[in-house]
Image (cartoon, rainbow, N blue to C red):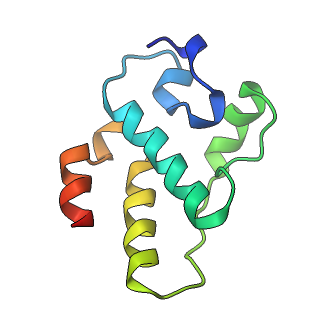
């Protein structure tokens, strides 16, 4: 996968910064999808990749209004997946284990 082939709102920071990346970039994209499930929108409002690169530094996640265990679990997984540091993102096997 190359950065020019990815939709920018789902693109991991390391891809935007054109540095080495691995399967954790897919974990980041999964976190964006979880954000969409919880809030009905991607975490960023940017209209292009340049706006997104500026906006990503100010990302703050609001805790879901619902205190249902499912929402809390998804929020925890989402916030870990959306870490800007790829080494802090969980692997998919850990995500599956956490969601069981």
Q: Residue furthest bottom?
A: 67
Assign the N terminus to one quadrant of the image: top left
Vertical order, 29 against 48 (above or below)? below
At x 69%, y 55%, the residue is 41
Residue 84 seen: no
**32 or 49, which lies in front?**
32
At x 60%, y 55%, the residue is 36
Vertical order, 69 against 90 (above or below)? below
**Numbered disc total:** 0
Picture coordinates of residue 27 (x, y %)? 37, 41
At x 40%, y 31%, the residue is 25
The quadrant in which residue 49 appears is: top right
Residue 56 seen: yes
**74 or 87, which lies in front?**
74
Vertical order, 13 against 63 (above or below)? above
Picture coordinates of residue 72 (x, y %)? 42, 77
**37 or 88, which lies in front?**
37
Picture coordinates of residue 23 (x, y %)? 31, 29
The quadrant in which residue 6 appears is: top right
**73 or 53, which lies in front?**
73
Picture coordinates of residue 17 (x, y %)? 54, 21
Q: Is residue 61 left or right of 55 when viewed as pictured?
A: left
Vertical order, 72 against 66 (above or below)? above
Q: Is residue 44 left or right of 16 when viewed as pictured?
A: right
Assign the C terminus to one quadrant of the image: bottom left
At x 40%, y 77%, the residue is 70
């Amino acid at each position: 996968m190359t950065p020019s082939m990815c939709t920018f709102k789902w693109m991991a920071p390391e891809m935007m910064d054109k540095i080495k990346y691995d399967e954790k970039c897919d974990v980041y994209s999964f976190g964006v999808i979880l954000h969409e499930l919880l809030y009905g929108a991607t975490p960023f409002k940017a209209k292009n990749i340049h706006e997104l690169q500026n906006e990503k530094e100010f990302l703050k996640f609001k805790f879901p209004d619902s205190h249902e265990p499912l929402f809390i679990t998804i929020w925890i997984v989402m916030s870990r997946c959306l870490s800007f540091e790829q080494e802090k993102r969980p692997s998919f096997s850990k995500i599956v284990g956490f969601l069981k």
